[in-house]
Image: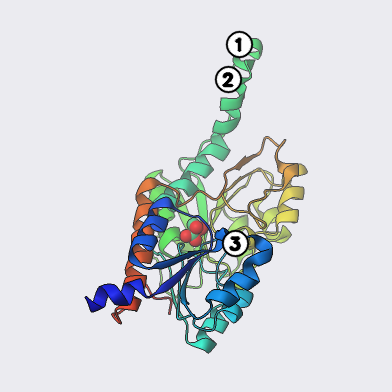
Amino acid sequence: PPAAMAMESLGVLLLHPMNAYLEQELDSRFRLFRFWDSPPDGRAEFLRANSSAIRAVVGNAGYNADAALIDALPSLEIVASFSVGIDRVDLPKCRERGIRVTNTPDVLTDDVADLAVGLAIAALRKIPQADRYVRAGLWKAKGDYTLTTRFSGKRVAILGLGRIGLAIAKRAEAFGCSISYHSRSEKPFPNYKFFTNVVDLAANCDVLIVACSLNAETHHMVNRKVMDALGPDGVLINIGRGALVDEPELVSALLEKRLGAAGLDVFEHEPFAPEQLFSLDNVVLVPHVGSDTEETCKAMADLVLKNLEAHALNKPLLTPVP
Ligand code: DGY
């Protein structure tokens, strides 16, 4: 049938092995090209050889359709990102070339918000540190673990009150926390206190949670001034993107204990986290796992597949990036 033919003829370049189910379904529905099948020094040649067939790219938060890749693919029609954040897609270039872009909003909101609150509690209650204490035999040798700090009832500030920021606010409210925020959204939230300035936001909270998207305006938005405003009792949580925070300044603030603690899911140069943090007791580190649950990854993969299918069949995209 023509629909099946339209799908089978859509050449899709998957940039790296991000999800087994996604890969398997892409392979069975479309004409799949696996970028990692060619060695790094053979990729330019691989793109040249397949440039007329590749009409779609699937990338994610780690690697996506950047300027070099888009330039190498003259037949590219759509970038379907396996992520909500599309900071690694060259959007101006896509716009210029008329390349459509889709992402995976909504389906991951709850999981990322869960992790944000989880990191805040882990950082304040020192859960990973306490776990290490037990495993090292220190409970028996040295006695009770140190006292920690409560999360319930704290003043939680959220940077970026979009879908994920709002889901974090709802969870924090359930813990009896008061909510303040800074956001580009014009929409007022009567129960939450708005700050026009990020330094003032940080100066008036106990826990600052970074949940905005990365772009030229938000790059290094959490700078030394913001960290100093949070201060030695403040906690910084980042589940957005590493580059929202000035990472060298964060490392110094944690080393010098000018900042109380941090919980980090994202880093400026993933898959690397600054090694100076590894020996510190005031930071909880996880490897960009905000949306990594079985349930969410399946839903994200289904959205990527449905968007590509809609594109192949000339139907409206499900989650187009405006
Ligand atoms: C996203 O979807 O942008 C998350 O960072 C997971 O990749």
Position of residue 233 relative to residue 125, above or below, is below
Q: What secondary structure is found at the residue carrying circle 3?
A: loop
Of residue 206 and residue 269, the one placed in the foreground of this image is 269
Residue at (51% x, 39% y) in the render: 121
Spot occupied by residue 246 in the image (x, y as percentages of width and height): 70, 59
| Cα gap from disc 1 to disc 3, whole angstroms | 53 Å
Kindly identify which numbered label has been placed on residue 140.
Answer: 1
Of residue 181 and residue 304, the one placed in the foreground of this image is 304
Q: Please state if 236 lies on the left or on the right of 186 as rendered.
A: right
How many neighbours does mark 3 have within 10 angstroms: few (below 14), some (14-19), or many (20 or more)? some
Mark toward the start of the polypeptide (1 vs 3)? 3
Residue at (41% x, 70% y) in the render: 188
Mark toward the start of the polypeptide (2 vs 3)? 3
Looking at the image, which residue sits at the far front? 49
| Cα gap from disc 2 to disc 1, whole angstroms | 8 Å
Q: Is residue 147 visible?
A: no
Residues marked 1 and 3 touching at CB (< 8 Å): no
Q: Please state if 8 lies on the left or on the right of 63 as rendered.
A: left
- Can you tell which quarter of the image residue 314 is in? bottom left
Kindly identify which numbered label has been placed on residue 33.
Answer: none
Spot occupied by residue 67 in the image (x, y as percentages of width and height): 62, 77
- The verdict on label 3 being within 8 Å of ligand 1 is no
Q: What secondary structure is found at the residue carrying circle 1?
A: helix
Looking at the image, which residue sits at the far top? 140
In front: label 2 or label 3: 3
Kindly identify which numbered label has been placed on residue 134.
Answer: 2
Q: Amino acid at mark 1?
A: Lys
Mark toward the start of the polypeptide (2 vs 1)? 2
Position of residue 145 relative to residue 49, above or below, is above
Residue ID for mark 3: 38
Q: Amino acid at mark 2?
A: Val
